[in-house]
Structures are given as C-alpha cells and as structure tokens.
Amino acid sequence: MAIDAVGALGVVLRAERLEVHGAALAGTWFVPARCRDARCIVFLHEGLGSVRQWKEFPARLCAATQLRGFAFDRRGHGRSEPLVGRRSPDYLREEGLEWLPAVLAAAGIAQPVPFGHSDGGSIALYYAAAHPVAALVVEAAHVFVEELALSGIRQLGREWHPSGMARRSARSHGPKTEALFTAWHDTWLSAPFRDFNMLDVLPRISCPTLVLQGERDPYGTPAQVDAIARGVRGPAQRWLVPGAGHAPHLEAGDAVVEHVANFLRDSLR
C-alpha cells in the first residue's frame, strides 16, 4: 500500500486495491499515529456514495478514537469497477452477507466495527446479525420501506440533472455516474423492493448499537430509529440529530464525531 497523504489530524491515509468476487474495489485506510488497537472502524457509504464523499469524517473519527479506519467503494461506486447487469431487489442483504465479509477478508480486517450510512447502515445491520462485532453505528439506515423515502427518491429523480447533482456526483463516480444512479433509483422504486423488510434480522444483533438519524431526514422518519433500537438484542442508543438531514456526519460533524467517539470508547472499553 502506498502512502497517499498524512492528514493534519495525524492520520495516515493509504490507498489500496482489493479483488473481491472477481471485481477490483478501491479502498482507503485511515491510521492514527498512536493506534495500538486491532479493531477497525469500517465505513460503509450510502446508496450514491463513495470513499471521497465521506470527506474528512473518517479521519476525524479515527483521530478522536485512535482506532484504524477503512472505507471502500462498493462495486459501481467511486474508483471501483462498474456494476454489471441490473441490481437485485435483494442487494442490501447481498452486500451485507456476501460482499462485506469478502471485502473484510481481502483487507485482512478481523475485528470490524461497522459504521454504516443509509444503504451502508442497512448493510452493516445485515453483517452484524451474522457475524460478531464489538460495536455498531448506523446512521439514517432503513429496515423497511416508507413512503417518505420513495417520495424523496422520486423528487431526486426529477431534480437529478436540473439541480446539478448529476454533475457533482460525476466528480466521485466518473463515467459510472448515470448507471449508478439509475440502478439505485429504479431498484428502490421497483415493485419487488416495496417488500423490503429486515425487522426479523435485528434480534440476531447482540452488540452495543448506536442508531442515529437527522431529525429532518427527507428519506426516513424516526420510526426507522425506533424499530432498530427496539429490534436489536443488545443495548441500543437512539439519537435524532437536531437540525440535520440525511447526512448528519457532514451537516453536524463536530457533534457526530464527539457522540460516536464517546459511544465507541464506552462500548469497546
């Protein structure tokens, strides 16, 4: 792994390429100078996200916790290989139970601490239900389909080009941008996806879990937070982030870093 940069926070960033299920995936390590812990925060991005779109948040959280971090672009995202064929309506389960374990094995991560945002939160829940983890953080995760989410996705579809979002997303995804958006948009609005529901999975999660969501999230109501916190078997903390929308880690970064760092210190002590 080549050293890409040493951040002002004292966190070394290292780029890595992984071969997973025959696809080349791009990843980035975040390694604090004083890190002495084998556990690793694994950052799982949203449905249209990438490593780049986390911005400085992974480095800030790793500096605050002195834990290593690893973020990667799922297939079709960022600097990873393009998607092949249509996306399955069951893609969140497939990502959590098939792809994520393979990514962690390829990266040599034996003690992951998943931090999942939106789609990444649902993927993290699937993974934690099937594998032991010391702690889990999910942000704006979905465990069932709400009309609010579908309405928000329809609106985004109408605004995708006029708002300039397509052009801005292309900075992260390049020529894959349109295919990625179509796959995400069309899958969520498809008839089979309306049956998506993972409430039966949650009781298999026994680790401490922090469930956070922006109080103004346009894609989910507090019912998602309540369902996750009630559904997991281990201790759960709820947090509706005041004034935040769908990405509290960017919109209220200082508060999220502090809150998550405190949760992880207590949970991993």
Image (cartoon, rainbow, N blue to C red):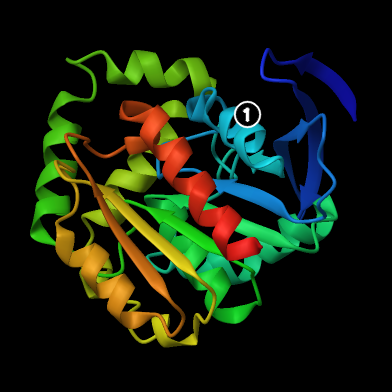
Q: In which image quadrant can residue 72 be found?
A: top right
- Looking at this view, is 63 or 153 the one in front? 63
**58 up-or-down from 187: above or below:** above
In this image, 27 relative to 89: left or right?
right
Q: Residue at image x 32%, y 37%?
A: 248
Residue 163 is situated, as x and y percent measured from the top left of the image, at 19, 15
In this image, 232 relative to 33: left or right?
left
**125 up-or-down from 250: above or below:** below
Instruction: Give the structural element (helix, strand or loop) at label 1.
Output: helix
Question: Which amino acid type is marked by label 1?
Answer: Ala
- Looking at this view, is 72 or 263 the one in front? 263
Q: Which residue is mark 1?
A: 59
Is residue 132 among what the camera can see? Answer: yes
- Looking at this view, is 249 or 52 the one in front? 249
- Density class for disc 1 (Cα within 10 Å; few <14, some 14-19, many ≥20) is many
Residue 101 is situated, as x and y percent measured from the top left of the image, at 70, 65
Q: Which image quarter holds the N terminus?
A: top right
Outermost right residue: 1
Is residue 196 among what the camera can see? Answer: no
Residue 114 is situated, as x and y percent measured from the top left of the image, at 58, 57
- Looking at this view, is 179 or 8 the one in front? 8
Residue 230 is situated, as x and y percent measured from the top left of the image, at 29, 79
